[in-house]
Image (tube, rainbow, N blue to C red):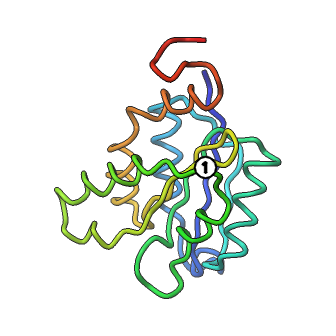
Amino acid sequence: MRWKVAILTASDRGFRGEREDTSAQVIRELIEEEINGEIIEYRVVPDEKDEIMAALIEMTDYFKVDLILTTGGTGLAARDVTPEATLAVIDRQAPGFAEAMRMISMQKTPKAMLSRAVSGLRGRTLIINLPGSPKGVSENLEAIMGQLPHALGILTGLVGDHGNET
């Protein structure tokens, strides 16, 4: 199965072209190599809740992607609003992904407890918030990569909840 994936970067500096989006490059490489994902939409938006929400809604409702990975905006700074935007558009939370990422990251750095990343479902799309740094993206994605195909299979109806193909 080839999964349809979108990447959304929330970054004021990235949006203004003042910073190269290396985190999205890491996401692209890992998703294409590890789960046979196809990046069908990529966007950089400023750290504005309404713009993040609009992009997430368009990626799910128009592009009908299976998975959206966001990068950036998950910290404690006043402009870090990606979790709030995500919570505003999802139907249900899927907290295990964010919990697993924090648990694995805490083994590497106590700063991982500062992450406010969330994960959830909008329709049949899984949305997962990742940190803004390339290293953080890589470590967090590696923590959950093994469960992504099964989760996406359940969401799309290709796999039953207990691993039985439908």
Image spot of residue 72 (x, y percent): 50, 68
Q: Residue beneath label 1, please?
A: 68
| Residue 144, picture quadrant | top left
Horizontal relation, residue 62 to residue 162: left or right: right
Image spot of residue 151 (x, y percent): 51, 32
Image spot of residue 137 (x, y percent): 40, 56
Count of picture labels: 1
Of 40 and 64, nearer the camera is 64
Neighbour class for label 1 at 10 Å: few (<14), some, many (≥20)? many
- Residue at image x 76%, y 41%? 64
Image spot of residue 107 (x, y percent): 17, 56
Looking at the image, is 148 positioned above or below residue 15?
above
Of 58 and 18, nearer the camera is 58
> Could you tell me which secondary element the residue under label 1 belongs to?
strand
Three-letter code for the amino acid on which mark 1 is drawn? Ile
Looking at the image, is 38 positioned above or below residue 129?
above
Looking at the image, is 137 positioned above or below residue 158?
below
- Residue at image x 73%, y 52%? 59
- Residue at image x 53%, y 56%? 24
Of 4 and 49, nearer the camera is 49
